Image (cartoon, rainbow, N blue to C red):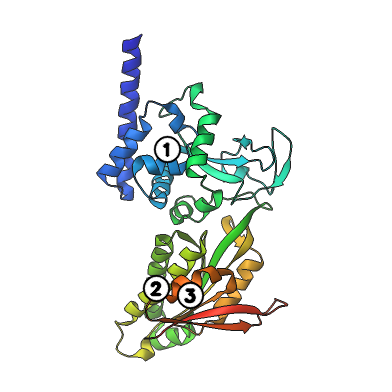
């Protein structure tokens, strides 16, 4: 019997090692793959059932962002399954029923205490990962609620909203959305809008093909910078993008990096008249995540306000609201920027809004 068990384990370990090699195509190096193999082969199966991504990050010695990217690619390749676990705010019990984003609804009823609550993507909905049963079947001992509670207390849960703001998840699973006519509550999101000033003149001066090429190049580095700062581009609108971040700090740092990159981009042109001028606006607040045209999108006053704030930008600056005021001190420490405060009336809002404008001094 022992020989049979060892033979079975050997086959499973070989299958895991072989499957992980598929991550080569996503740019994960040999060390990262070997560490992931060792994790999936771990003897204690409790680590592989509805596993907290932060626990996995600790085991792999990777950042949370890099770990989520690895797990999402492993999901794509069939190594793991993704769980949208929902914790009841009343009894603290966790419902494992939502195996797909499409299983989530606006309101959730706890199967234990029958408490009805809004599906909160920041606090109640969290993501975990399990090894795919086809790769390694787990025994019933893997399901240990006390162990999971201890892990969550140690590391903190990863919210469903965090995964929704992972660019790689949106790219690999573009149709992974909640059902039509349903929504998820987002208690705090930072929305960033950009646009190019004078884009009509740009096309007129450079011709459609050349201007479009420049716009695509600017999109490329904007996408890269959003991803680098833990955000996701939700959509492009003409020459503009809408991006989201779970952290205000990440959103503002991304905006600053965008303007710095645009300055580098413009150095290829012979005169300032040829420069591409980037406008950026940032705002934080609550909203809802919805299914719009079969893609995950964001809706609400926060989104509309962020778009209006971007409209205040004159170009080569960053305009953000007082909802991000706790970040101003850090931003003032950044060299070559000054911060100006003003009160503005935005279309659709009854009260004036305090905004801050970051402007490069040179």
Residue 82 visible from this viewpoint? no
Q: Classify residue 305 by image quadrant.
A: bottom right
Which label is found at residue 78? 1
- Relative to 312, does residue 144 appear above or below in the rendering? above
Which label is found at residue 218? 2
Residue projecting furthest to the top: 1
| 100 on left or right of 273 | right
The residue that disc 3 covers is 239
Which residue is at 48% across, 41% downward? 154
Rounded to the nearest angstrom, the CA distance separating label 2 from label 3 is 9 Å
Task: Provide the secondary structure element on which disc 3 rests.
Answer: loop
Residue 337 visible from this viewpoint? yes
Q: Classify residue 283 by image quadrant.
A: bottom right
- Relative to 348, does residue 89 appear above or below in the rendering? above
- Relative to 175, does residue 238 appear above or below in the rendering? below
Task: Provide the secondary structure element on which disc 2 rests.
Answer: helix
Q: Residues within 10 Å of mark 2 (few under 14, many from 20)?
A: many
Rounded to the nearest angstrom, the CA distance separating label 3 from label 1 is 36 Å
Q: Residues within 10 Å of mark 3 (few under 14, many from 20)?
A: some
């Amino acid at each position: 019997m022992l020989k049979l068990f060892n033979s079975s384990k050997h086959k499973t370990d070989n299958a895991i090692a072989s499957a992980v090699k598929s991550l080569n195509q996503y740019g994960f190096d040999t060390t990262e793959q070997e560490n992931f193999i060792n994790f999936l082969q771990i003897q204690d199966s409790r680590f592989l059932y509805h596993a907290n991504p932060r626990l996995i990050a600790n085991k792999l010695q990777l950042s949370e962002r890099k770990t989520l990217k690895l797990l999402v690619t492993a999901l794509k390749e069939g190594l793991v399954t993704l769980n949208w676990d929902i914790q009841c705010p009343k009894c603290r019990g966790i419902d494992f029923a939502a195996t797909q984003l499409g299983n989530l609804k606006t309101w959730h009823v706890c199967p234990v205490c029958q408490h009805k609550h809004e599906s909160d993507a920041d606090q109640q909905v969290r993501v975990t990962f399990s090894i795919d049963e086809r790769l390694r079947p787990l025994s019933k001992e893997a399901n240990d609620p006390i162990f999971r509670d201890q892990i969550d207390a140690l590391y903190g849960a990863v919210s469903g909203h965090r995964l929704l703001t992972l660019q790689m998840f949106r790219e690999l699973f573009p149709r992974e959305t909640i059902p039509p006519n349903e929504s998820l509550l987002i208690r705090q999101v930072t929305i960033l809008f950009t646009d190019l000033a004078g884009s009509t003149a740009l096309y007129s001066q450079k011709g459609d093909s050349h201007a479009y090429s420049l716009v695509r190049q600017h999109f490329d580095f904007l996408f890269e910078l959003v991803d680098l700062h833990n955000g996701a581009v939700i959509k492009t609108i003409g020459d503009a993008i809408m991006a989201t971040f779970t952290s205000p700090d990440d959103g503002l740092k991304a905006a600053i990096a965008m303007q710095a990159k645009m300055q580098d981009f413009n150095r290829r042109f012979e005169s300032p008249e040829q420069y591409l001028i980037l406008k950026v606006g940032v705002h934080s607040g609550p909203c809802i995540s919805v299914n719009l045209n079969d893609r995950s999108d964001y809706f609400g006053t926060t989104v509309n306000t962020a778009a209006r704030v971007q409209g205040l930008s004159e170009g080569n600056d960053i305009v953000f609201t007082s909802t991000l005021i706790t970040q101003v001190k850090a931003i003032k420490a950044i060299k070559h920027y000054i911060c100006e405060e003003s009160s503005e009336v935005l279309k659709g809002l009854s009260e004036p809004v305090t905004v801050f404008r970051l402007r490069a001094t040179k």
